[in-house]
Amino acid sequence: MPIINGTVLFNKENHGDGLKKALELKPQEIIMEIRESGLKGRGGAGFPTGTKWMLAAAAISEKKFVICNADEGEPGTFKDRVLLDEYTRLVFEGMIIAGYAIGASKGYVYLRGEYRYLLNKLKSEIDKMYSENQLGNNILGSNFHFDIEIRLGSGAYVCGEESALIESLEGHRGEPRNRPPYPVNTGFMGYPTIVNNVETFAAVPVIIFKGAEWFEKIGTDRSKGTKLISVSGDCEKPGVYEVPFGTTINEMLEMVAAKDTKAVQIGGASGICVPKSEFGRNISFEDVSTGGSIIIFNKDRDMLQVLKNFMEFFVEESCGQCTPCRIGNIKLLEGVQMIERGECSMSYLKELIELGKTMQIASKCGLGQSSPNPFIAIMTHFENEIFTQW
Amino acid sequence: MNAKILKRAPVSQQRQIIDKDSKADIGNIVEIEINGKDFKVPLGVTILEACRSNGIHIPTLCYHEDLCIAGVCRICVVEVEGMKTLQASCAYPITNRINVWTSSEKVRKARRHILDLLLSEHYGQCYTCHRNNNCELQTLAKEYGVDFFRYGHIQERRYSVDRSSFAVIRDMDKCVLCKRCVRTCIDLQEVGVLEATYRGDRTKISTFMDKPLADVICINCGQCINRCPTAALKANDPSDEIWEAIDNPEKHVIIQTAPSPRASIGEEFGLPPGHSMTGELNTALRMIGFDRVFDTNFSADLTIMEEGTELLLRLKKKLVDKDDNIKLPQFTSCSPGWIKYIEHFYPDYLDYLSTCKSPQQMFGAILKTFYAELHNIDPANIVTVALMPCSAKKFECNRPEMRSSGYKDIDYGLTTREMAQMIKEAGLNLPELPKSNFDDPFGEASGAGLIFGATGGVMEAALRTVYELVTGRQVPFQNLNIEVCRGFEGIKEASILLTEVKPEWSFLEGLELKFIIAHGTANAKKVMEMLIRGELDDYHFVEIMACPGGCIGGGGQPIPTSPEIRKKRAEAIYKEEMELSVRKSHENPHIKFIYEKFLTDGPCGHISHKLLHTHYVRRGRYID
């Protein structure tokens, strides 16, 4: 799997003593630094990390928690796996810095069940950090205490949603909570909690080491830094790439040597399907936002089958809690199957697209809010292709 | 905006209350705009509460006043300006100025879609459904003018109906997954029999390992039935068998009616809660064809005599004989839901329970022995029906211990809802019927028996008798109304001082009789934990009812239920009680008669022990 030398995370020259430097700062100074860097959540939603930390830091509580969301379950996304595997220290350092910044002394890594093979490696890294006084009591002489514990998920996609993740971490059925209140106020066991993506944490020590100003120069106006992109599908060089925000889809396709591309799915199953006519768009929070994946479809792919695959995934993975997501996804899938059999009228298709729009605004969490995306996008962009098949 | 977690439901469904000292707090009042109009609402109330208190209707399905918030059905979504998605109004606490639209185009469309989706998976048809005309899903469909199944309609069953339980039938094909039953069972009652299993479209409310309800630790309280918006949960209805018995001329069919159904059955006929229908109900039952209509309050009086005597005997054994094996406080045993609860959850503490059967079962035992003898009827031909506010009574009458007459003491337990159905089937409109009295000899009862229906009633009735037995004086409360026993506080504690006692009770002189009243098994659990911690060592008597509010909130009562409705029903009972001439169990002339003629060795004597007392089963939490 080729890993292209990136400018932030994949450039080892940037991996300095961010942790040591951070612990010499005041917590507020770290938060200011992160805010100034413009770092936004790498999980996909793009919430400003500094703001999240500030909210958690402001919450008054005897206990607070830091959670690293390593439940990387979005189809086509595998960049966190690479970070955890090859840049483990960076992730843990980010968590420690976050704990220091918000006043938490315990961190959890919620590791995707399917990544169990990484468990021993992560554990031994943690042990090593304890022996090097980078975890535990009085970290690097700073008087700051922090522990990290790894918990395994059990294979539910929805547990990547932060409140469902917290439920699962507490030992309950992984179901998203009502928001507000948000985890920064009422999170794990009812205490203020920040949940950040693996990649977000990994960026933190680099930002502290190199400075917000340096980081802020990379990327676009509203999307700072770089993004790890897991590239899969019809191309010659699939893998994990680190590209600055603002990189266009065309540039990406060229980089990975993709030919005859008809469409790309950006951000996994729940992301956006971009047809060829829009390949000039760029990867950034203001344009095509992504949690970190591109799936490439060339001219031979049947988009209806692509869609069916996605919908089967959502039917399987909906937690079943709220009505729009639980029943809506199955209706969309049935719609795809009806189209396949040539039994779907155009008026019913319209009803389904309307249903998709309701799901986007009425579902309880991000899963149901984004699961109709591929349906709506593919039915809009590839209507001709799909309906001329028979 | 710190939220406090109040209950131990699945955390995702806990009601989260926003702290009043939040920084966004502007004098505890927030100005918001709803549908373009300004309103002032208390900080932290939900959009739904804010709307309802201002007369703005928002449809709901998973929301229930008694339960913690779920926010899962999404039917109550509203538009909050500036937010990308619609918000579930039941779950959205107001902490700052927001503009809310409760029926914008987006909102109406979304609600209609959600309804269409729910209907597409809701198996069955309204005219073959016992919740026809009292179904929240049906009401919503009507409200939103649903006239076709936009996304289809399921044609085949997906699950089989669980009829294993004597009390509760579960038909998961009618379930809309609102999780009210889950929240009722886990959070309101803290029993925890039901939970969602599987996920996505296969999500289903299950028992442990999907076992039949009869094989899990269900206490049969039926609170889930009362809160189910559809017919997914219902009581096990014996009315066909009862009709059959009525139609059989060889059978002598006797019905006893408990106090609570009278206070609530009017609701089934369109009356507002709080109308007592005692006289009308008697007439209806005779017109239906019951051979005798008796009053459970009679056996409630009998219970008081037995249970009160049992308490005094325990006190004597403990205080005079210094018998350490005697357990105090004595817990009441009228509520079969509570009995099954303690058998499952606290099997080591069964000795604290009074050995008295419930009034229902005492009556059955008397009917098939004393009454049969008195009227020269073959007990094999007597069919005893009990009209109860309760689903657990259906289980209770089927307990193997409950055959001390040599027959099944009570043949059928019938709920208020089922009774109303029978009355309707007989073509009667209850509120229009003339009033009539109960039949002799078990028709006259004291008011003490009547108030058994509300939480605290058994305690109040017992105190009236025990105090007077011991001191020879009336309880020192105005109009005999022991107010400390009344009201809906979860756990009530009080005491009464015994002074100038009769000589035979001299060992009780100066005793402060301490008692506790709890309703709902969540509160029962708290009391049991107090007992285990030794905090109840100096208490003497504990009344526990499994259902919130006591029997008036029972699992067989009319649907819907709410704190307000239960309050009205209780008021009706207390009001009726004030109008009765005899208000103390021991003054009931028929009680005196039965102890003279039949239970000749007195309360807690040999005969009563055989017929009116029982024993309990160590069930435990783990069932094979």
Image: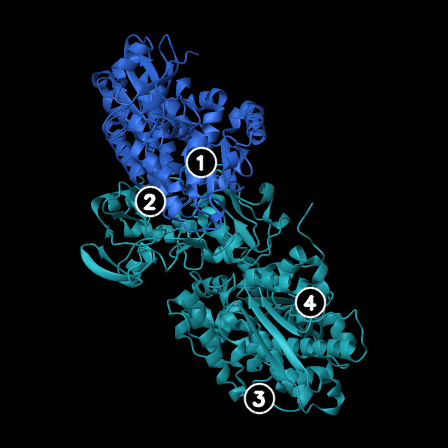
Chain colours: A blue, B cyan
The amino acid sitting under disc 1 is Leu
Q: Dot 2: within a 10 Å radius of its alpha carbon, few (fewer than 14), some, or many (20 or more) residues?
A: many
The residue under label 3 is B476
Which type of secondary structure does the marked residue at label 3 adopt? loop
Left or right placement of residue B189 versus residue B55 in this view = right
Residue furthest left as drawn: B36
The residue under label 4 is B353
For the residues bearing labels 3 and 2, Cβ distance under 8 angstroms? no
Which type of secondary structure does the marked residue at label 2 adopt? helix
Mark pair 2, 1: CA separation: 54 Å
Q: Dot 4: within a 10 Å radius of its alpha carbon, few (fewer than 14), some, or many (20 or more) residues?
A: many
Left or right placement of residue A315 versus residue A105 in this view = left
Tell me which numbered mark, 4 or 3, is placed earlier along the sequence. 4
Mark pair 4, 3: CA separation: 27 Å
The amino acid sitting under disc 3 is Pro
Mark 3 belongs to which subunit?
B
| Front position among marks 4 and 3 | 3
The residue under label 1 is A23
Mark 4 belongs to which subunit?
B
State whether residue B90 is above or below residue B120.
Answer: below
Return the x and y of residue A362 as percentages of the image width and height.
31, 41
Mark pair 2, 4: CA separation: 48 Å
Return the x and y of residue A223 as percentages of the image width and height.
27, 28
Which type of secondary structure does the marked residue at label 4 adopt? loop
Q: Dot 3: within a 10 Å radius of its alpha carbon, few (fewer than 14), some, or many (20 or more) residues?
A: some
